[in-house]
Amino acid sequence: MVNLVLILVCILAGWLLRRLRILPDETHRGINIWVLYLAVPAVALKYVPTIHWGPELIVPALSPILVWIGSWLLFMLYSRIRPMSPATRTALTLVSGLGNTSFLGFPLVSAYYGEQALPIAVVCDQLCFIIMATIASVMAMNTMPDTAIGTSPAEKPNAIAVIKKLLSFPPFIGFLAALILPLFIDLSPAVPLFDKICATLAPMALFSVGMQLSFEGWREELPLLSASLAYKLLLAPLLVAAVVAGLAASGTTRQISVFEAAMAPMITAGVIATQYNLNPRLANLTVSIGILLSLVTTALWYYAMTHLPISLTDLMQ
C-alpha cells in the first residue's frame, strides 16, 4: 500500500508543482538525466546478474514485440476504415506499441509483485527500448512531414545512426555492463551502493512523469485517443496473455510479462512524435491520459491475474 501511495503522491506532486510554476518548465529534463544515466543502469547492475537465463525468459522478451506488432497491424487496418494522415497513423503506432516499462513499469511492478520481480521487468524494458531505438525511430524518421521542426534530409535513417543511438543509450549500456562485468568481477560489494541509487528511481521517475502530464484539447481527439488506449491498456496485454499461455514459463514470469504489456504509453514515444511532427498533440495526450488510466487498468490486470476465483493466470497454465 505504501508503494501505491508513493506512486500517486509523486505523480500528483510533479503535476501540481508544474501547474503552480514553482519549478521551471524544463525541470523534468534534468530529472530524466538522473533516472536514465544513473537510476535505471543501477537497477540493471543490481538485478540482471541475479537472472537465471533460460527458455522461460523468451516470454518477457516476446511481450514488447507482440505489443508493437499488434499496434502496427491495428492502425494499418484502422487507417483504411478511418482515413488519416501517415503522420497520425505513425504517431498512434508509436504511443500504442511502446510501453512505459521503466519510469512507470518498475515502480508498479515493485508495488504489486515486489522487488524480486524486477529482473523480469528489466528484460521487458530492454526489448521495448530496442524496438524504440530501431524500428520505431526509423518509422518516425521515414514518416516525418517536410515541415518537421529541426529536421533535415540528413536525419533520414541509416544503419550507422541507428546502431550509434542504440549503443549510446545509458540504460542499454548498463544492461550490457550487467551482463558482462559479472563474468570478470564480483559486483556484490557494490550492491549497497546500487540499492541507494535504485531507491531514487521510483520517486524521481514518477515526479518527472507528473510534470509532463497535459490534458488540453482531449475532446477533439477522443475517437483516436479511445482507440489507442483501448489497445494499449486492454487489448495488448490480452494479446500477450493469449500468446504466452502455451509457452514454458513460471506463472510469475507470465504475469509480469502481461503486466508490463499493460503499461501506459512510453513518454519517449510522445517525444519522438513531437520531434518529427507526427501529430504531437494527439501523441502527448495519449501518453498523459494513458498514464492516469493505467493506474486503474494495471490494478485490474493484477487482480485478474492473482485474485479472481479462476484467475487469468490459471487460464494461462
Image: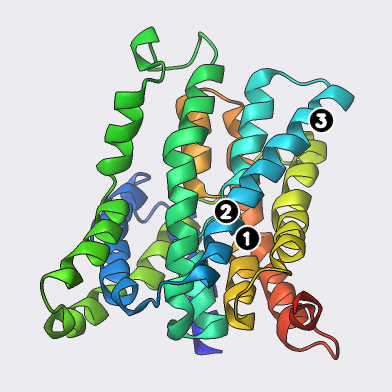
Judge from the rendering whether residue 79 lies leftward or rightward of residue 214; answer left or right: right
| Mark 3 vs 1, N-terminal side | 3
- Between marks 3 and 2, how big is the CA–CA gap? 20 Å
Check whether the beta carbons of the residues at disc 3 and disc 2 lie within 8 A of each other: no
Task: Indicate the quadrant where residue 239 lies.
Answer: bottom right
User: Residue at position x 35%, y 30% from top?
Assistant: 162
- Between marks 3 and 1, how big is the CA–CA gap? 21 Å
Q: Quadrant of the C terminus?
A: bottom right
Judge from the rendering whether residue 53 lies leftward or rightward of residue 163; answer left or right: right
Judge from the rendering whether residue 241 lies leftward or rightward of residue 35; answer left or right: right
Residue 46 placed where, x, y %? 28, 76
Check whether the beta carbons of the residues at disc 1 and disc 2 lie within 8 A of each other: yes
228 shown above or below 8 = above
130 shown above or below 185 = above
User: Residue at position x 14%, y 80% from top?
Assistant: 190
Residue 95 placed where, x, y %? 61, 42
Task: Indicate the quadrant where residue 81 lies.
Answer: top right
| Mark 3 vs 2, N-terminal side | 2
- The residue to which callout 1 is attached is 261
Within 10 Å of disc 2 (Cα), the crowding (few <14, some 14-19, many 20+) is many
Disc nearest the viewer among 1 and 2: 2
Q: Is residue 290 visible?
A: yes
User: Residue at position x 47%, y 27% from top?
Assistant: 138
Q: Could you say which is closer to the camera, residue 56 or residue 125?
A: 56
85 shown above or below 204 = above
What residue type is disc 2 on? Pro
What residue type is disc 3 on? Leu
Within 10 Å of disc 3 (Cα), the crowding (few <14, some 14-19, many 20+) is few
- The residue to which callout 2 is attached is 64
Residue 192 placed where, x, y %? 19, 85
What residue type is disc 1 on? Ala
- The residue to which callout 3 is attached is 77
